[in-house]
Image (cartoon, rainbow, N blue to C red):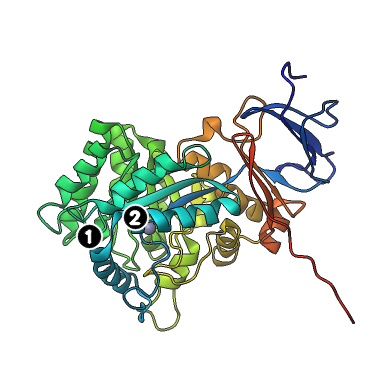
Amino acid sequence: MPTVSPSLLLKHCRLPDDSPQVSPVDIAIAADKIVAIAPQLDLSAPTVIEVAGSLVSPPFVESHIHLDSALTAGQPRVNQSGTLFEGIEIWRDRKQALDFDDVCQRAMQALKQQASQGILYVRTHADVSEASLTALKALLSVREAVKDWMTLQVVAFPQDGLYGSPDSADLLEEALRLGTDVVGGIPHYELTREDGVRSVQRIFALATQYDRLIDIHCDEIDDDQSRFLEVVAACALRSGLGSRVTASHTTAFASYNNAYALKLMGLLRRSQINFIANPLINITLQGRTDTYPKRRGVTRVKELWQSGLNVSLGHDCIQDPWYSLGTGNMLDVASMAVHVCQMTGQDEIQACYDMITTQGAKTLNIADGYGIEVGKPANLIVLDAESPQAAIRDRATVKAVISRGQILAETTPPRLSWYL
Ligand SMILES: [Zn+2]
């Protein structure tokens, strides 16, 4: 029993890894910590939530989003081809009009939308290809503004490449000096393969020098010759940075021949890097140059998971030049992964839920403070579902979001009335 009296009590909670036979538990929270978990806690608290057997989960983790471009779809024009490269061109025009307040206001709106749907951990990329570093400075200030209720990691992301223009590499380093959590890159978009390899080496040198995590947009193309993933994995292995390194997208991996993929998988297992797949976006962007058969364009999520590698899922875009749809709901992302990656077995659907929760926390290197356990920070969500599988199936409403022991947001699930 806790020695301090709880401030908040959740009654009859079903946890994500419970079998249906296990009785629900009560969870007691004091200040910002979980202080007790047991089937029948004989405790009272000023605020009691009767969960009545619903799923209570650690919060969702959004491990890959671009908040600087969020909520700009159609500005200055719509992406007619639907390709990644037209998206980059449109963003190049839109970012000329970027100012600090514009980025802060849209990022804050997107973060509130995410938090209301159960996300309390976000890794956002910030485009650092403009000399003013406006997007980056704005997102660093948003990180500070939300820190009491949301953990936001900012990646310095050179959208136009490190060696595409003379100043890009210096801007990336300046972004690290300003305090980004993570260093990023985009080797498949560099002018030559050699520049791509050089960019990965430079990113690892900077990460070591400034003691930062790495998250690289890697091989986001249908070109089966785009092979920067092996470079990232080899650098991770040699540098010992391992699980501090993430390869995002890696869609070309879905186009590699199986002989090469098998050899690569051995290197990936040794490297212990993390993977982020963005199935909503890559099922949409990839395969655009194919006729039929048309590729799905999402990396080998199921095989990476079966190999014991850490895979998490991201939304990538919310209403921006690459994707005019999206609401920030991680259950949409998990549902798309279930479908596109053909992970329809019960344990596979559970794995897709883990990819938006515990595995996302591993990617962000925050696993120590994450999860529903006594002594951990009181961050949890109550879903209108009895299991992770049902939550994905129904895109369940997140009824309550609790951040640092405080109720941050509540949503009442829709109620249907029939008049037949
Ligand atoms: Zn991205």
The answer to whether residue 133 is seen in the rendering is yes
Task: Please name the residue shown 19% across and 58% down the image.
Answer: 193
The mark closer to the camera, 2 or 1, is 2
Spot occupied by residue 127 in the image (x, y as percentages of width and height): 29, 55
| Image position, residue 6 (x, y; %) | 73, 26
Ligand 1 image position (quadrant): bottom left
Of the 4 image quadrants, the one containing the N terminus is top right
The residue lying at 63 percent from left, 37 percent from top is 406
Q: Secondary structure at mark 1?
A: loop
Image point (56%, 64%), residue name = 336
Q: Nearer the viewer, residue 64 or 146?
A: 146
Q: Which mark is residue 418?
A: none
* Outermost residue to the left: 166
Q: Which residue is mark 2?
A: 101
Residues 372 and 379: in front is 379
Residue 267 in view, yes or no:
no
Camera-nearest residue between 364 and 258: 364
- What type is the residue that disc 2 sits on? Asp
Q: Is mark 1 within 8 Å of ligand 1?
A: no
Along the polypeptide, which appears first: circle 2 or circle 1? 2
Residue 194 percent across, percent down from the top left: 16, 55
* Left/right of residue 403 with respect to residue 150 in the rendered view: right
Q: Residue at x 79, y 65 (%)?
A: 415
Question: In the image, which disc is placed on residue 160?
Answer: 1
Amino acid at the residue labelled 1? Asp
Label 1 neighbour load within 10 Å: few <14, some 14-19, many 20+ = many
